Amino acid sequence: MKSTQRDLELSGGYHLAMTPDIQWTPDDINLSDLEFWRRPWAEREAAFATLRKERPISFYEETAPEGTAIEFPKGPGYYALTRHRDIATASRHPEIFLSGPGAVSQIDLPPEMVEYFSGMISTDNPKHARLRRIVSNAFNPRNVRAVEDSIERVADQVIKRSMTSGTGDFVVDVAAPFPLEIICNMMGVPPSEFATVLKCSNIILSMGDRELIPEGSDQVLAVLEAGATLTAIMEELGKYRIDNPIDDITSALVNAEIESEKLTQQELASFFVLLVTAGNETTRTAIAHALHALTEHPDQKERLIADYEGFSKTAVDEIVRWASPVIWMRRTLAVDHTLSGFDLKAGDKVLLFYSSANRDEEAFVDPDVFDVGRSPNDHYGFGAPGPHFCLGAHLARREITVMWRELLSRTPGIHATDGPSQLASSFVNGIKHLPYSF
Ligand code: HEM
């Protein structure tokens, strides 16, 4: 592998990382190595371009967390699906590509973790359809329009707060608090608990990054503790909402019945953990990547400012394609199956690399170009069509639309003043910090 990184200095001292002159071979690439995920995005994209072309379905050993009190059995490894068309096929056949054994983790979860982290995202039909029905109403376009006032109000408050200093960390000031406050309002979480919810969801989704779980501490126990803390909040809220239901999601959950049975404590806990983590990290990541992308591509920023109404729909989807906040989801083979000529066996694990599908040359014209007017844009940032397609996609699109409309109309000069600090994670394409100024 050869690599030479070229930098371009834009106005304001901002460094633009150019596509590296890097040549990977498939044998150089180890998607299970955290070091790979610490590489600059352009290098990672180049590696996936090589895989799509030369080894579109490739095998990797699993790495279980080390130095933790909980024992993880050594798993069989997994296949990485990197092409748009293979991921589409897997998503269209949930009876073959199961989510149940663990959609959100490479390793099978030990029993200690199942309690908090086995939400509907890791279930299959018929149970998945029943669970999804309980909350799907809250996230349909009509109900998202009903929380529009809350989205507008929170955006206004967040921007006013951040504008008092005029400079700072965009993730801390804007991208993180905005979706957090909206999902917490929808769940009925009181403001006194917002900071705790943010901290716990950061820990849960960032396994591996030592800024969030310091060196020397047990990462898995930290994640379990975060799950237990969120569960305690849910229990407290839920108890009250059984007798005093209002029009919030927690009331819908605690009063829901599936085949005349209430959700169990475990089902409630994992629902809550799923909704607050999925509703938080992903939208934050997209909003933060947007600032990075609009700073790197000032021509696209100009187009948006000139005609926000005209471009907002295509721009939001391009931001989600570009950011690919969720890098992969896992499926497990229910039966032997041949995918694009490749023989997979029952029990095999496959990781659907949505981030790679989003740069697939077969599916997009100029996939490495950030184009706020891109149409068509059949991206898989919210997952591919199938039963697990993102429940919060309408909400996330509204949040990104409103936040960027307000930022660009009130502070058109907003820009990143230095490069982003990347989250060391193979799962969330996160940005931990992004210095900015108006
Ligand atoms: C830009 C923001 C977002 C992105 C990129 C995103 C991405 C995704 C992806 C890729 C999946 C597919 C899971 C799979 O294939 O197994 C998913 C599912 C899901 N998302 Fe999102 N999401 C976002 C925002 C949200 C929001 C705001 C919520 C609100 C709570 C949410 C809730 C969920 C839930 C509950 C699922 C599981 C659906 C199921 O298994 O039926 N997401 N999301």
Image (tube, rainbow, N blue to C red):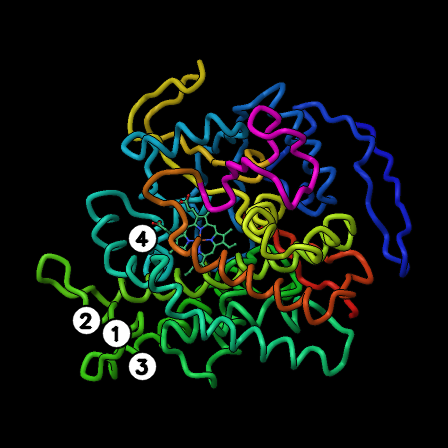
Q: Nearer the viewer, mark 1 or mark 3?
A: 1
Using the numbered discs, state the Cα–Cα distance from disc 3 to disc 4 in whole angstroms.
22 Å
Q: Is residue 196 visible?
A: yes
Circles 3 and 4: CB atoms closer than 8 Å: no
**Does mark 4 have its CB less than 8 Å from ligand 1?**
yes
The mark nearer the N terminus, 3 or 4, is 4
- Give the residue at mark 4: 120
Where residue 349 appears, as percent x and y from the top left, is: 42, 33
The mark nearer the N terminus, 1 or 3, is 3
- Give the residue at mark 3: 236
Q: In front here: 202 or 128?
A: 128
Q: Which residues are magenta?
A: 359-383
Using the numbered discs, state the Cα–Cα distance from disc 3 to disc 2 in whole angstroms.
14 Å
Circles 2 and 1: CB atoms closer than 8 Å: yes
**Does mark 1 have its CB less than 8 Å from ligand 1?**
no
Q: If the image is split into quadrants, where does the C terminus sit?
A: bottom right
The amino acid sitting under disc 1 is Ser
Q: If the image is split into quadrants, where does the N terminus sit?
A: top right
- Give the residue at mark 1: 251
Using the numbered discs, state the Cα–Cα distance from disc 4 to disc 2 in whole angstroms.
17 Å
Task: Characterize the local packing of mark 1: few (<14), some (14-19) or many (20 or more) Cα atoms within 10 angstroms.
Answer: many
Circles 1 and 3: CB atoms closer than 8 Å: no
Where residue 136 appears, as percent x and y from the top left, is: 30, 57
Where residue 312 appears, as percent x and y from the top left, is: 58, 53
Q: Is residue 211 left or right of residue 389?
A: right
- Give the residue at mark 2: 255
